[in-house]
Image (tube, rainbow, N blue to C red):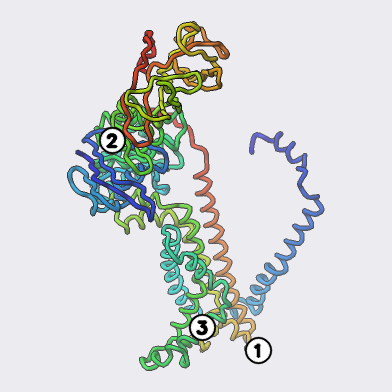
Amino acid sequence: MPGNGKFNLRRSASRRGVEESPFVKWTLIAIGLAFALVFLLLPLVSVFTEAFAKGFGYFFSALTTPDSLSAIRLTLLIAAISVPLNVVFGLAASWAIAKFEFRGKSVLITLIDLPFAVSPVVAGLVFVLLFGLQGYFGAWLDEHDIRIIFAVPGMVLATTFVTFPFVARELIPVMQATGSEQEQAALTLGASGWQTFWYVTLPSVKWGLLYGVILCNARAMGEFGAVYVVSAHIMGQTETMSLRVQSLYENPRGETAAFAVASLLAFLALLTLALKTFVEWQTQRNYDLAQQPVPELKSDTHA
Amino acid sequence: MSIELKNVSKQFGEVAAVNKVNFSVKEGELMALLGPSGGGKTTVLRMIAGLELPTDGDIFIRGERVNDIPVQKRNIGFVFQNYALFKNMTIFKNIAFGLKIKKWKRPAIEERVTELLKLLGLAGMEKRYPHQLSGGQRQRVAIARALAPKPSVLLLDEPFGAVDAKIRQELREWLVHLHHDLNVTTLFVTHDQEEAMEVSDRIVIFSKGNLEQIGSPRDVYEQPVNEFVARFIGVMNVLELEVRDGFGRLNELKFPVPENFAGEGLRIGFRPYAVQVSSDLARFEYRAKLSRTYFLGIMLRLELELASGLTVRSRMTKEEYAQLDLWDGREVSFQIRQYRILSRENAALTPELQTPYELPPSIAENI
């Protein structure tokens, strides 16, 4: 608090009785920092140093080989399909859970969390079991010449499954907190269901939604396990960036190229973090605004 | 008739929230739906709005049966208990919302919103957001938003529940003035009998989903149809009497038993204002000690404790109190001027009975 220095000084001088000793405090901080340095920052730095080990020229040429470009395109394509799908699903599910009472609500909530609990590899295998040549729908799909497994559709399915919970999980608490009174108010003012959704519901959950989309997108672009199982990792065709990193790394001369692609993924992750922090800051600011005391007004009089 | 309900019922599962309710609201009337919480009054309001559908019965607005008309098409203005303002919109946009939906032209919207802002004392606040307003201002924005599309009826759910006592009083007076100026049919829900008495032309009293009585504030106070209404509106002393040798008795108190009364127990009720107190101990029949005085502004409430421990509540003005030279602990005499036989709940009440005592003049006659 500015202009209140004396008070602050006195407060910081007298330690509260329940506080730990400075030794414990600094030891804990040191452990936390050391872990973050060794396990989080160091790998990140090494990815970038390895990527640029052979200079900028090599970095760019590694990224711009046809196979790498195709991997980047495919990654963006998969994210561009599965994220909107999960936005639609997340909005629908969180709306249903927050605003209606129905049988099987708890089952739905549990199901939404399922992809978090299941190993991505198992998730991929499930799709192979369903749509693979020996799978339940395999023969029928083969007859009609539709390829899902070892092709892009299967990769989209697997990614959508794995990123399923992100949007819904973010939106459910926001929708529950907002309640349905504002929407009812819109209805009494003549708004249709669609207008209510567009003008009232969506604006009130927009930050939560954006937060969910960012997390969902980050996972969609970085997913490896599930996609690995359902793709045949054919270079230039069914290879995403994370698969490309692996195949390049297995090649003895591709190490630096692998790190170049990996650094691009890491860069996307950093971008996601920055966006996420910004959105969190926005949400917090909106919350603070709503909490702040009401300013006194001169014109607060009426006849 | 602006609003009419015919045999309207609402079931929530096994529970009957509203049970065969009939009443009508006249054009331009200001009416209160009063009752304890859980009495079904809010459900009635929401059914009129179309936010709930009746299980049975018909609802009419301006002569048109609206049961099958969705909430959007009923042309009602609804003010929610917590206002439900659109948090992400400015005050201007909040009030303009209904007009925008109804595809009003921009200049017409601006004119209407400006008019309402001025009428509701909100001029200069159009660019603010709801969180920047005080409770009373939010309330007025909610009313302005509901009034903007010129609804045929205005429905308010506990309109003064969420603001503090001082602003509540201000808002009550203000609602009466607003209603006087606009003359729009207004129906509001409240659990506060004082609020209902002060603000409305007529009151509908609910209890446990049943309509107990409809009438002017004076009617329901002076001629309650049953014990529930009698006890809910205002303060009432209720005594259980035992009938012995021609009188209903409780400790020192005795009341003549009405003609044709057969039974052993008798329940009576009387308003505090019907208890007359004198500092002259020989003046009235009963003796008591003034055990405690409550200051209620212009009026005082007195607790009289009889020798047997029975407590009777009385009421008088400050002037009377001063004239009688009373203080806590003083011995007084008192009599009960009027009382009422209370039958079992929901049964009709007989008119008030006068005690055979003389009636000295009182300056608090009609309070």
Choose mark 2 or mark 1, whichever is in front. Answer: 2
Please give the chain letter of the residue carrying mark 1. Answer: A
- Image height of A86 relative to A138, above or below: above
Q: Which residue is mark 3?
A: A126
Measured Cα–Cα span from mark 2 to mark 1? 78 Å
**Given the image, on which type of amino acid does mark 2 rest?**
Glu
**How many other residues sit within 10 Å of disc 3, few (<14), some (14-19) or many (≥20)?**
some
**Given the image, on which type of amino acid does mark 3 rest?**
Val
Q: Where, by quadrant of the figure, is residue A53 drawn?
A: bottom right
Choose mark 1 or mark 3, whichever is in front. Answer: 3
Q: Which residue is mark 2?
A: B115
Q: Is residue B90 left or right of residue A291?
A: left
Image quadrant occupied by the C terminus of chain B: top left
Please give the chain letter of the residue carrying mark 3. Answer: A
Measured Cα–Cα span from mark 1 to mark 3? 33 Å
Residue visible at 58% across and 13% down in the picture: B329
**Nearer to the camera, A300 or A140:** A140
Query: Upstream in the sequence, badge 1 or badge 3?
Result: 3
Residue visible at 38% across and 36% down in the picture: B345
Indicate the position of residue A221 as horizontal and vertical percent values: 52, 74
Q: Where, by quadrant of the figure, is residue B184 drawn?
A: top left
**Given the image, on which type of amino acid does mark 1 rest?**
Pro
* Callouts 3 and 2 on one subunit: no
| SS state under label 2 | helix
Measured Cα–Cα span from mark 3 to mark 2? 64 Å
Circles 2 and 1: CB atoms closer than 8 Å = no
Q: Pick out the residue farthest to the left.
A: B63
| SS state under label 1 | loop
Q: Is residue B184 left or right of residue A240?
A: left
Res. A252 mark: 1
Image quadrant occupied by the N terminus of chain B: top left
Residue B71 appears in view: yes
